[in-house]
Amino acid sequence: MKLIQILGTGCAKCNQLTDAAKAAANELGLDYKLEKVTDMMRFADFGVMLTPAMVVDGEVKVAGKVPSLEALKTMLQ
């Protein structure tokens, strides 16, 4: 099971990334758990300074933007 974490404060772009990550994971048929991380102190644990960010299995895949659905699918594979 993949752990997908969305780091963000709940802004519109954070919600867009959450929805897009879910859509990408579902299209790929992945077995995953999605967690929203809103605690800014935890962002620093990942070295993330810009939100929204997506972390997959502990590895930061993107920060500071919402990639396309196709780009997200590539990141999740």
Image: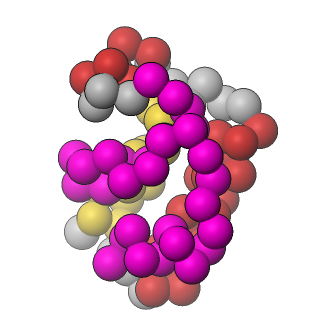
Name which quarter of the figure residue 34 lies in.
bottom left
Q: Quadrant of the N terminus?
A: bottom left
Residue beneath the point at 77% across and 38% down: 12
In the rendered image, residue 60 lying in the magenta stretch gets the answer: yes
Q: Is residue 62 left or right of residue 23?
A: left
Q: Position of residue 74 (x, y in %)?
A: 42, 77
Colouring used for the render: secondary structure
Above or below, 7 against 72 in this view is: above
Above or below, 11 against 19 in this view is: above
Seen as rendered, the residue at the extreme right is 12
Q: Position of residue 4 (x, y in %)?
A: 38, 55
Seen as rendered, the residue at the extreme top is 41
In the rendered image, residue 28 lying in the magenta stretch gets the answer: no
Residue beneath the point at 31% across and 55% down: 56
Q: Is residue 22 left or right of residue 3?
A: right
- Please count the marks in the image: 0
Q: Is residue 31 visible?
A: yes
Q: Quadrant of the C terminus?
A: bottom left
Name which quarter of the figure residue 27 lies in.
bottom right
The residue range painted magenta reads: 49-77
Residue beneath the point at 23% across and 54% down: 57
Q: Position of residue 52 (x, y in %)?
A: 57, 38
Q: Is residue 36 visible?
A: no
Above or below, 57 against 2 in this view is: above
Q: Is residue 39 left or right of residue 20?
A: left
User: Between residues 6 and 73, which one lies in front from this camera angle?
Assistant: 73
Residue beneath the point at 28% across and 31% down: 46
